[in-house]
Structure formats: C-alpha cells, structure tokens
Amino acid sequence: MAFLCVKYECRAPAETTQLSMADMYDLALEQIAWIDAQGYPVTINFCEHHGSEDGYLPSPSVLAAAAARITRNVRLQVNVLLPFSDPLRVAEDVAVLDHLSRGRAEVLLLGGYVSSEMEMFGVDPKQRGALMDEGVQALKQAWSGQSFSFRGRNARIAPRPLQTPHPPIMMGGSAAPAARRAAREGDGFIGGMPHLNDIYVAECQKLGKTPRYQAEMAHSFLYVSETPEQDWERLAPCALYETNCYARWQTGTDLDMLFSSAMDTDALKALGTYQVVRPEAVLEKAPSLAPNDAYILHPLVGGLDADTSWRTLRNFFEKVAPKVAINPL
C-alpha cells in the first residue's frame, strides 16, 4: 500500500525537446485528464520556479486551474514559494481553485533556496523562516472568511474555499527548521530528504498532533518499462539535464536534497534518483511499502519525448496500479 503523486514542472529545454511551451502545457493537461479517468486516488503536484530559461512552470495555480476543469477526481496540489508571494493573493488564488475543482485543491508551502529567485523577488534569505510563519498564519486567517489584520492593514478574503476549514496545507523543506515548522503550522510534511521525517514526527509528538508525511519514495522517480535499457537511453539526456540543473541551483546552500550532479548516464544510474524498471520489479516491492510511502511519477522530466512519457505512464496505470493498493496520503 502506498500513495501516488504525479509531478509536473513543464519545462521545455532546447537541449532535450522540440516542444514549444504551449505544446508542453497541452501535453501535461492531456496526461492529467487521462490519469483522472483511470479512477485512482492520485495527487497531481504542480511545481514552481522562476526565471529559468527552459520555462520552468512559474505559475502553478494557473495550470492547476486549467486542470480543474478537465478532471473530477485527482487532487490538485500547487507548490507555493511563500516568501516570494503575497499571502493574500495566494489565499485568493487557491480559494478560487478550490471552487473550480469542487474541493480538490491543496498547497505545498516551500521557503525557496535559489539565490537568483530570492534576488528577483527581493527576499532576504535570512527572513525566509519569518516570512513562512507569517504567511501560513495569514492563509489560515484569510480562509476563515473573517476580517483580520495583515501587516497593519485590514484584510478580508472572499470567497472562502469550498473545503473546511481550508484546503490542506502541506509544508516542505530540506532543513530541520522546516520540518518543525510543518509540525507546528501545517497539516502534513513532504520533506526534501527522508531523515527529516524523524524530526517532523518528534515535533508532532511534542505537540500532541498526528503526523502526516511522505515517507520513502518507492523506486524514487519511477518509469515503468518493458524495455528498460532502451528507455534509459531516451530518459538519460532529460534526467541529466534536470539533476544537473537542480545541483547548480543548490550550489552555495547547505541543504541536503534529493538531486546531485551527474556527468553521464552511468553516474546518473548510480545516483538512483531516476529508476526505469520492469512492472514485475515494482510489484515485487509493493507488499513491503508503508501506507505513506510514495510512488512518484515524473512523466515529462526535462522535456522527455511524448512517446516514452506516455508509454511509461500507461505501463504504470495498466500493469502496476491494478495490482497494488493505492491510497491518499
């Protein structure tokens, strides 16, 4: 038993794809509609970064709103780099998304770590923690529907979200303070590395709260294939592009994160971040998974070609999903 998340960041690197950004958005929405029709409890995660030459998705709530109108079942989880955002506008956008989706919206609040993004939005890295604390409190007050004071100004957000008391507030991060903040302020934790879960759980226990968190990633980013070696050849340039991009962004930080640099396919395979495996290998491991372990699919990684993306996606839903227990987080 495990839960299932499908990740979309919608980037179109010139090095790896001929798709335009419009084509990439169309393909993502086509896949999301198809996933929704399969009927499994799935969370679609919409990522967020800014100023990237490859067009990395900067406005996840906009794409999630488009997905809301063509789906009926999947959860729509928007990443929010909260220190870069006006919490009042975030509260309004997510409230509208919650109504558009008939109560399927949720947020994953993140502090950000890319120096160029912090400079772009005028954020002092030392203030990220304070901005996260202020922002999550503002979201909760905003979603109450009542008037409140924000930075000395009167504020009221309408409409209220459809979900009560508000859409789930998941919180992420790649450092111990983020894990403790998620325990204090959030409804769940999706950490950058598994060892942070222990810190999160311990803080929840101190507070008398029930932990809700993503545990191990089954097979890491998973691509189900009947021809693994051939699909590795197709995946490798895209995955190398992505992991090296994240590694560059992490330069100068002390964060312990999932991605590391890799210079070639062999090095990429050794990292284990991306795994191309046969259906039977996934099924063999499935009985050992905990309910909060995760299958994470990343079908358009680094501009992966549509054929390989579709084939590995369909393989999971047609050859794995019917034979394993998938549950919400």
Image (cartoon, rainbow, N blue to C red):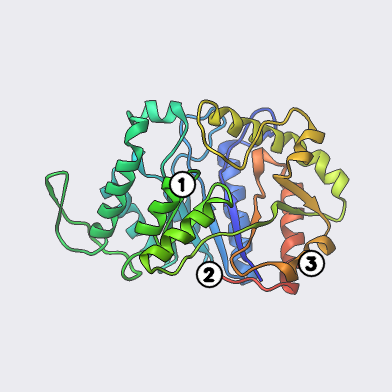
* Figure quadrant of residue 125: top left
Q: Name the amino acid, label 3.
A: Leu
Q: Name the amino acid, label 2.
A: Asn
Locate the N terminus and report the quarter of the image it occupies: bottom right
The answer to whether marks 1 and 3 mark residues whose Cβ atoms lie closer than 8 Å is no
> Which residue occupies 54% across, 30% down?
249
* Percent x, y of residue 280: 84, 64
Marks 2/1: CA distance? 34 Å
Q: Name the amino acid, label 1.
A: Ala
- What residue did someone put label 3 on? 283
* Percent x, y of residue 28: 59, 50
Q: Is residue 44 left or right of residue 164?
A: right
- What residue did someone put label 2 on? 73
Q: Earlier in the sequence, mark 1 or mark 3?
A: 1
Q: Secondary structure at mark 2?
A: loop
User: Mark 2, mark 1: which one is toward the viewer?
Assistant: 1
- What residue did someone put label 1 on? 176
